[in-house]
Image: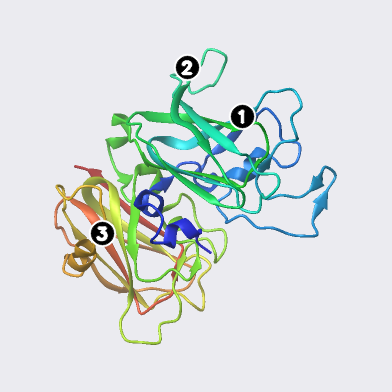
Amino acid sequence: MPSIENLNPDVPLYARTGINLASAGLGATAVSATNEFFAPLERMLWDSAPIFIPDKFDDHGKWMDGWETQRRRDGGHDHAVIKLACAGRIIGFNVDTSHFTGNYAPACKIEAAAPANGQIDGDTQWVEILRHRALGANGQHFFKCDSFESWTHLRLHIYPDGGVARLRVYGVPELADADRKGQIDLAASLNGGRILAFSDAHYGDYTRLLAPGRGVNMGDGWETRRRREPGYDWMVIALGARGQIEQAVIDTAHFKGNFPHEASLQAADLLNFGDGLTDALVTDSMFWNDLLPRQKLSADSEHAYRDQLVDIGPVTHVRFNIFPDGGVSRLRLMGVPA
């Protein structure tokens, strides 16, 4: 199931529409930690929502779904370094202590770096981008970030020790000038493509629609509930860069008895729209120009469209329609940045 911050209207907008640069599924990795006695750092980057299994123990004690250090007795504190999935500007965090009750980290601080050679060492210059913040037990803690630079690595400090279930780092990937040359996937999360709104996302993890690679199973993609009323399902996507779409790929990998019957694409050039999401945008998307007229889909297959695309010039936003409902593993929108 999608994590709660993606769907809850009460959480900040950056947590619902930003790209989690600390997602293991997008390529974020654990680099080092001062201590991983109870639970390894890599779990803190998992995309799944944290779980609790009451009777599960391992050789070190209670099994916990996250990063957990042993109790410190030396007056110091623990910290860990992670490499983000890609370089990007960070707009906010969620430091999630779900299921950590008597063993959560009481406070945190976050620093960032962008070493020229891509390697962290003793000479790395760290910059504080989130000052000391208090944390509570078994909860999600959202913090806005006002840093406007591009970062590749983060160092999370916890005071003095304890556990963090998940660290979500919401941001906007920064495309290097070299990456803007030639054809790229304009909708890819790692290129800055973002899902702004959708009609339904009952099953799976809809954010994986724009992830790299093909889906590993039926839960690795966007799937809506069975529609029992007239209409169809849809999704609104902001491209990572304004560009001319030259090929669309709709992949229904692993969706066999539940793939959509048909799909279509609409698009618009909203160069001056900005970065926000409004009800007006969703309403307006129903009237955008057709980019790909309705096409029949099949089970567990990649569907590539080139000649079927309508030349409507450079665009910034796309509406992906599926008729009447169902599941799609990946959407690729290949094109040249304008």
Q: Is residue 327 left or right of residue 75?
A: left
- Label 2 amino acid? Gln
Q: Do callouts 2 and 1 mark residues in contact (Cβ within 8 Å)? A: no
> Which residue was labeled with disc 2?
125
Identified at 32% across, 78% down, the residue is 232
Q: Is residue 151 at least partly visible in the picture?
A: yes
Q: Which residue lies at the image location 70% right of the left edge and 23% below the top edge? A: 75
- Camera-side mark, 2 or 1: 1
Mark closer to the observer (1, 3): 1
Query: Who comes first in sequence, dot 1 or dot 3?
Result: 1
- Residue 79: which disc? 1
- For the C terminus, the quadrant is top left
Q: Percent from the top left, x then y, of residue 243?
A: 22, 47
Label 2, label 3: how far apart the Cα atoms are: 39 Å
Of labels 2 and 3, earlier in sequence is 2
Name the side, left or right, on which 131 lies relative to 336. Answer: right
Residue at left offset 47%, top offset 71% = 202
Instruction: Work out which residue is located at the far bottom of the displayed protein and give it.
Output: 229
